[in-house]
């Protein structure tokens, strides 16, 4: 069987993907790379190979990827610092003879006018992958519905306001698990070389529409408040979030900065993330799940926020 190496295997995406591949009987084929192997002791017990590897220490990656034929490069979390990290992994994979690399990229990055800060990390990484000599597949994931409903949702419910500079821009938020299922299909299937998949939810919506769904389903008031870029920056300034990365490290436990978040909202507002496809269904055989379903699945948690 084809051996598959997964970077960042102890993160949420990596764990979800590993669960799915183990359930498919592929535990012995998995090489899991992490900065904290102790966190994946359970995976070793399940039959996976667990290896130490650190994006910031390229010398650790050469050994970590040995023996793999396919790689999933899960993008790092530090916006603005990822290209060098990803290059280390790409170079190690190419040198070790990995034949096919898939990458968790992001939608809407082809247009250089897209103002989103995250665009630069992803498009530059894609350029490196295409030049590596390996076969490749780009998994361009849309904005996670999980991030807005599960992570940000409780704060929205507590305040009764969803404040954003995204205006009336449209996007098709996607379940992270649908992204994971799509990646699993690529890693275990055939014929995906040279393909770009836009992994999105099933419908385009504004944040105003999503806020209305939250109110309808939970029975609690939620008001959408459209704000300007300058006002959004001021909100982050008040929270002590820097506008640019500080020494490429996280601040207050967050791997992002306000430039990242404000330009993301601007990109939505200006239509750069207005992408909706059936690629989840094409890859997995089932339709992508909706934002409504995500809210319904988490309604009790949201009501209790």
Image: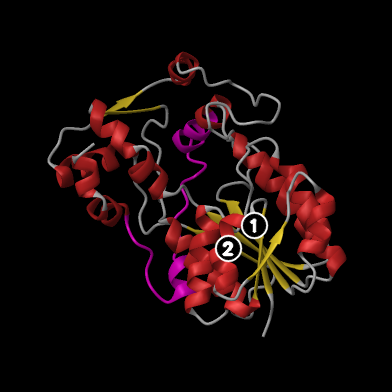
| Nearer the observer, 305 or 70 | 305
- Whether label 2 touches label 1, CB < 8 Å: yes
Per the image, the residue denoted by label 1 is 37
Q: Is residue 224 above or below residue 12?
A: above
Q: Secondary structure at mark 2?
A: helix
Q: Residue at x 49, y 51 (%)?
A: 142
Residue 197, compared with residue 162, is above or below; it is below
Q: Looking at the image, which residue sits at the far bottom?
A: 1
**Residue 295 x/y as whole percent:** 26, 50
Q: Which mark is residue 41?
A: 2
Dot 1 lies on which element? helix
Asked whether residue 57 appears in the rendered view, the answer is: yes
The answer to whether residue 183 of the structure is visible from this angle is: no
Q: Residue at x 24, y 45 (%)?
A: 301
Question: Magenta stretch: residue 23 in it?
Answer: no
Quadrant including the C terminus = top left
Quadrant of the image occupied by residue 160? top left
**Separation of marks 2 and 1 at Cα, in angstroms:** 7 Å
Q: From which residue to which does the magenta span run?
A: 263-290
Residue 267 belongs to magenta span: yes
Q: Residues within 10 Å of mark 2 (few under 14, many from 20)?
A: few
* Picture residue at 67% right of the left edge, 51% below the top: 35
Left or right of 174, for residue 184: right
């Amino acid at each position: 069987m084809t051996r598959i190496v997964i970077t960042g295997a102890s993160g949420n995406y990596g764990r979800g993907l590993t669960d799915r591949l183990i359930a498919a009987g592929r535990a012995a084929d998995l090489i899991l790379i992490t900065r904290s192997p102790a966190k994946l002791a359970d995976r070793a017990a399940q039959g996976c190979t667990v290896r130490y590897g650190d994006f910031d220490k390229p010398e650790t990656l050469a050994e970590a990827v040995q023996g793999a034929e396919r790689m999933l490069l899960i993008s790092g979390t530090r916006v603005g610092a990822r290209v060098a990290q990803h290059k280390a992994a790409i170079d190690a994979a190419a040198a070790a003879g990995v034949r096919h690399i898939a990458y968790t990229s992001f939608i809407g990055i082809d247009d250089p006018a897209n103002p989103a800060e995250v665009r630069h990390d992803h498009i530059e990484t894609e350029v490196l992958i295409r030049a590596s000599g390996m076969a490749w597949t780009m998994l361009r994931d849309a904005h996670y519905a999980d991030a807005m409903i599960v992570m940000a949702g409780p704060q929205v419910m507590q305040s009764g306001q969803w404040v954003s500079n995204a205006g009336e821009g449209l996007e098709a938020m996607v379940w992270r698990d649908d992204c994971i299922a799509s990646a699993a299909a690529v890693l275990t299937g055939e014929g995906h070389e040279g393909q770009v998949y836009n992994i999105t939810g099933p419908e385009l919506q504004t944040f105003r529409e999503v806020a209305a769904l939250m109110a309808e389903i939970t029975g609690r008031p939620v008001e959408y408040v459209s704000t300007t870029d300058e006002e959004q920056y001021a909100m982050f300034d008040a929270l002590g979030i820097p506008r640019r990365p500080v020494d490429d490290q996280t601040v207050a436990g967050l791997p992002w900065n306000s430039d990242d978040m404000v330009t993301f909202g601007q990109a939505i507002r200006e239509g750069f993330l207005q992408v909706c496809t059936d690629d989840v269904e094409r890859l997995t055989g089932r339709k992508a799940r909706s934002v409504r379903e995500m809210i319904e699945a988490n309604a009790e948690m949201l009501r209790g926020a």
